[in-house]
Each structure stands twice: as C-alpha cells, then as structure tokens.
Image (tube, helix red, strand yellow):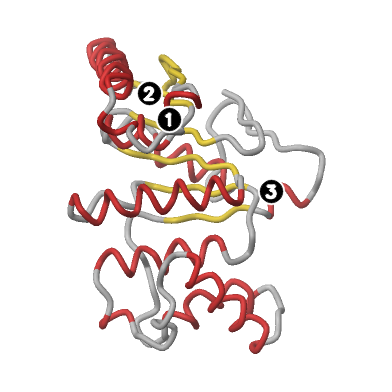
Amino acid sequence: MELARGDFLALLGPSGCGKSTLLRMIAGLIPPSAGEISFPADPAARKGIGFVFQEPTLMPWATAARNVALPLELAGMNRREAHARAVEMLARVELAGFEDAYPRALSGGMKMRVSIARALVTRPRLLLMDEPFAALDEITRFRLNNDLLNLWRDERFTVVFVTHSIFESVFLAERVVVMAPRPGRVVRELRVPAEDRDTPEFRTSASYAAHCREVSHALAAAMEAA
C-alpha cells in the first residue's frame, strides 16, 4: 500500500483486523511485526505527523487554546506565539470565541474539533485519524465530515482515516482500503473519483449509492474470507 502527498485514504474493516494497529505503526508508536513502513528521504517527513484518537483526550484543567497550543510549546515555541497559532487554528475548526472554554463546557463535537485543531496546529504533512467521529451523534458527525473535507481541500495534507462506516468512508476518501482479520491484511482497494465526490449533491447521488454498494460487497467478501 502506498500513499502519495495529499491523498485521503480510508481504512475500513471489521473489529480486530488491525486498522488502529496500522495507524500506530505509521506513527512510529509500535514497530511492525513484519515488513516495513518507509517514508521519503526528507527527515522531516516522519516528524510531520498529527494524530486524532477515538477520544478527544483533552487536558481537563486547560482551556481549548492551551490544549491546542501544547504541541507547539513542547516543540519550543514561545507561549505567546503558540497561543496566537492555537487561536487561529480554533477559528479554522469553527470554534472562534471558545478559546478560553474548558473541556467540561464543550459538547462532544466541540471537544473533537479541539482535538483536530491540536493535531493540525503543527501543520503536519500526514494526519492519522482513528475513528474520531464514531461516538458522535449523526448530525454532528455529518457536519464534522464536511468540515474535515473542507480543511483537507484547503490544506491538502495527507489523511489516513480509520472508520467502521461504509457511508463515511465513501463520502470522505478518494481511496477506500478494505481490510480482513486473522491475519490483518488488505484485501481490496476501491477508488472514488474526484468528479463524483466534488459536488454538493454527492451524498444524495446515484453515484454515492453505487460506490457504497461496491464497498459494502467488498467488505462482506473480506469478512467471509476471514
């Protein structure tokens, strides 16, 4: 499996097939048991990774801005500049005016927006997302799907997005990689052409339904092959 700069790839498969494990291997959090994960020769490539987990994992004693600024401060940026960048990033995820709010005062969707802002504030080349919207209600998930796509289209960072949702994978990703368990492996890759995706009506189109059916059949075949 290869990733080019600016790709949006979704990993789809049943529980236990290794989707989250693969993300952690890409991030360098755990070593691969076999094979290898290679990055471009540029040494900055491995460092330019943002990670959004299933839970927002915010510091409850820190404001939204302080949570977002944390990676910059850990990298040595002075607090004033880090705060300014954090405020700017919060505005990008539609949280302008909530810079001084604490996590306890934020809804689930707002907390996840803070988590996304924190992952993007360092301007990563690669964004890894491990089912970030799975625990949210459908309306909030719908909005965050749209917001994530808009951010990606503006910035063109590379995304690897783990999901259990066929509908979400087809809506978000240019490439849907279907995995099977025991052992975890890639069994099929499907593409969603840009000319299909880049229209406001895509979610209600016949093309979207057709892509969802194709991915659904691929997932069913992967589960039968397990």
Q: Circle 2 is placed at which residue position?
A: 179
Element assignment for label 2: strand
Please give the name of the residue rendered at 27% of the width and 19% of the height, measured from the top-left corner.
206
Q: Position of residue 152 (x, y in %)?
A: 53, 47
Distance between the alpha carbons at the discs numbered 2 and 3: 24 Å
Q: Is residue 34 above or below residue 154?
A: above
Distance between the alpha carbons at the discs numbered 1 and 2: 23 Å
Left or right: residue 75 compared with residue 128: right
Please give the name of the residue rendered at 61% of the width and 26% of the height, measured from the top-left corner.
2
Amino acid type at mark 3: Arg
Q: Nearer the viewer, residue 90 or 127?
A: 90
Q: Which mark is residue 46?
A: 3
Q: Is residue 114 above or below residue 213?
A: below
Q: Nearer the viewer, mark 3 or mark 1?
A: 1
Specify the quadrant that holds the N terminus: top right
Q: Residues within 10 Å of mark 2 (few under 14, many from 20)?
A: many
Amino acid type at mark 1: Arg
Distance between the alpha carbons at the discs numbered 3 and 1: 30 Å
Element assignment for label 1: helix
Q: Position of residue 32 (x, y in %)?
A: 55, 35
Write down the quadrant of residue 52 in the picture: bottom left
Specify the quadrant that holds the C terminus: top left
Left or right: residue 122 compared with residue 182: right
Write down the quadrant of residue 34 in the picture: top right
Q: Circle 1 is placed at which residue position?
A: 197
Disc 1 and disc 2 in contact, CB within 8 angstroms? no
Q: Is residue 58 above or below residue 97?
A: above
Q: Nearer the viewer, residue 133 or 96?
A: 96
Please give the name of the residue rendered at 44% of the width and 23% of the height, measured from the top-left corner.
192
Left or right: residue 17 compared with residue 138: right
